[in-house]
Image (spheres, rainbow, N blue to C red):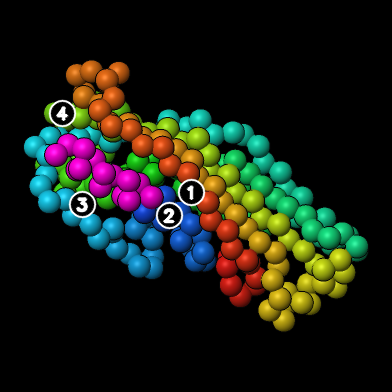
Amino acid sequence: MERSCFLFLRPALCTAVLGIFVTGCTFSRNWEYPPNPPKTLLNIKAANALPSKVVVRPFRDLRGERTVEESWKVIIPFYPYAADFSDRPETVKATEGGPAIKMNPSQDFARALADEIRNAGVFSSVTYAEGAGSDGADLVLNGTIRSTYGRRALTTYMLGPFGTIFWILGAPMGNASSIVEMDVQVAPVSDPARTLWQYTMQFKAERVIGIYYGR
């Protein structure tokens, strides 16, 4: 029974992470879960809830620190394309100086997963806790974020600044891709070193971007 109930965690985790990409396609800079649209949680329910209380803690952050911004090079004539990429998208600044996306992956991903598991009814109780307290829980869910890599490549069709005319006419500006890698483990609160269930996830999203779409 425990194994079958834990299987519900896999789609919950994937759906929670997918929220970042869906939200990224809108014009809001605030990460939110569930994303809007459709502003609904995963439609899946456990047949029977385990009589256990679970506490979800903020995820460990083991992401890299690289950020490269070179997309400005497409204004150089005969330059085919140029790319920006970052291991931590929330550190990238928008043109006006603020963050391109406002998020805290360690907390936001953990809260999203807690919401999904609670909604699925896998356990009798699911709470999110900032500190090391257990809130009377039997099990603890810990996660590790290994990557939230984001890349955007732009092109002006080797025409430098004149190529932006094609952007205005609706031609693609380039493409964007995002990669999320993380894993989660469930363990007894009384013995955190004893893993009862674990799952490693890799998710990749790619899209064409233009002035009027894909941003």
Residue 72 in sight in this render: no
1 and 4 marks in contact (CB < 8 Å): no
Spot occupied by residue 195 in the image (x, y as percentages of width and height): 28, 25
Pointer 1 residue: 203
- Give the Cα distance between marks 1 and 4: 30 Å
Mark 2 or mark 3: whose residue is earlier in sequence: 2
Q: Which residue: 85% across, 73% down?
A: 162
Instruction: Please say whether residue 78 is one of the residues in the magenta stretch.
Output: no
Q: In this figure, which residue is indicated by the disc labeled 3?
A: 120
Magenta region: 1-14
- Labels 1 and 2: the sequence-earlier one: 2
Q: Say which residue label 2 marks.
A: 18
Label 2 or label 4, whichever comes before in sequence order: 2
Give the residue type that dot 4 points to. Answer: Asp
Label located before the other in sequence (3 or 1):
3
Which of disc 4 and disc 3 is earlier in sequence?
Answer: 3
> Mark 4 — residue?
138
Q: Quadrant of residue 104?
A: top left
Depicted 92 relative to depicted 74: above or below: above
Residue 26 visible in the current orientation: yes
